[in-house]
Image (cartoon, rainbow, N blue to C red):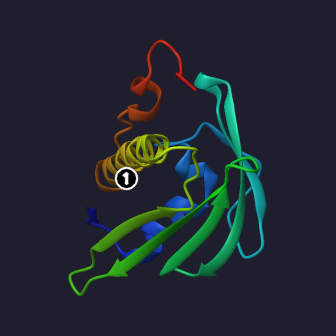
Amino acid sequence: MLIRKPANEVFEAIVDPAITTKFWFTDSTGRLEPGAEVRWTWSMYDMSSPVKVKEFEQDRRLVVEWGDEPATTTVEWTFDARDDGTTFVEVKETGYAGETGDEIVGWAIGSMGGFTQALAGLKAWLEHKVQLGLTEDRFPDGHPA
C-alpha cells in the first residue's frame, strides 16, 4: 500500500498505540520498540493477542511474533521510503498452522483481509485524518473466532 507520508510518520503510526488505535486495535499495553512484549486488544470483539518484537529497524522494518501458543505467526512490515516523500508499506505473515491445507489457506486469506483493512485504515488516517472504522465494522455481529 502506498501511503503519501514519509516513512518515519508511517512507521511511527504502527509502533505508537496512540496512533494505531485510530485505525486498528482499541488498546495496547505499550509501544513497539526493540525487545518489547505487549498485548493488543480489540475490545469490540473481546479479543486480544500477545505481541513480541523480534526485529526493529527504525523507519524501515519491523518484525513481530503474535498470537497465543501454539498458534503464533510472524509478521514483517517493511517501509520503503520513496524519493517523492511517500512510503510503500508491505506486510508479510508467515508460520500459519493447521491440520489441513484448507485450514491454513483459510487462515492466510482471513489474515490478508485483516491486514488489507489495517493498511487502508492507516492510509486514511495518515493522509486525511479520517477514522474509517474498518476493523470494528468488519464483523458487526461479533467476531466468528
Relative depth, front residue between 103 and 89 = 103
Image quadrant assignment for residue 138: top left
Image quadrant assignment for residue 145: top right
Which residue is at 79% across, 61% downward? 37
Residue 116 x, y percent position in the rendering: 34, 49
Q: What's under tag 1, amino acid-wise?
A: Leu
Residue 113 x, y percent position in the rendering: 36, 43
- 12 lies left or right of 124: right
- 76 lies left or right of 72: left
Residue 124 x, y percent position in the rendering: 31, 47
Q: Secondary structure at mark 1?
A: helix
Q: Give the labeled residue for mark 1.
A: 119
Q: Residues within 10 Å of mark 1 (few under 14, many from 20)?
A: many
Relative depth, front residue between 125 and 53 = 53
- Reply above or below: 100 against 96: above
Which image quadrant: the N terminus? bottom left
Residue 77 x, y percent position in the rendering: 47, 69
Relative depth, front residue between 19 and 48 = 48
- Reply above or below: 47 against 99: above
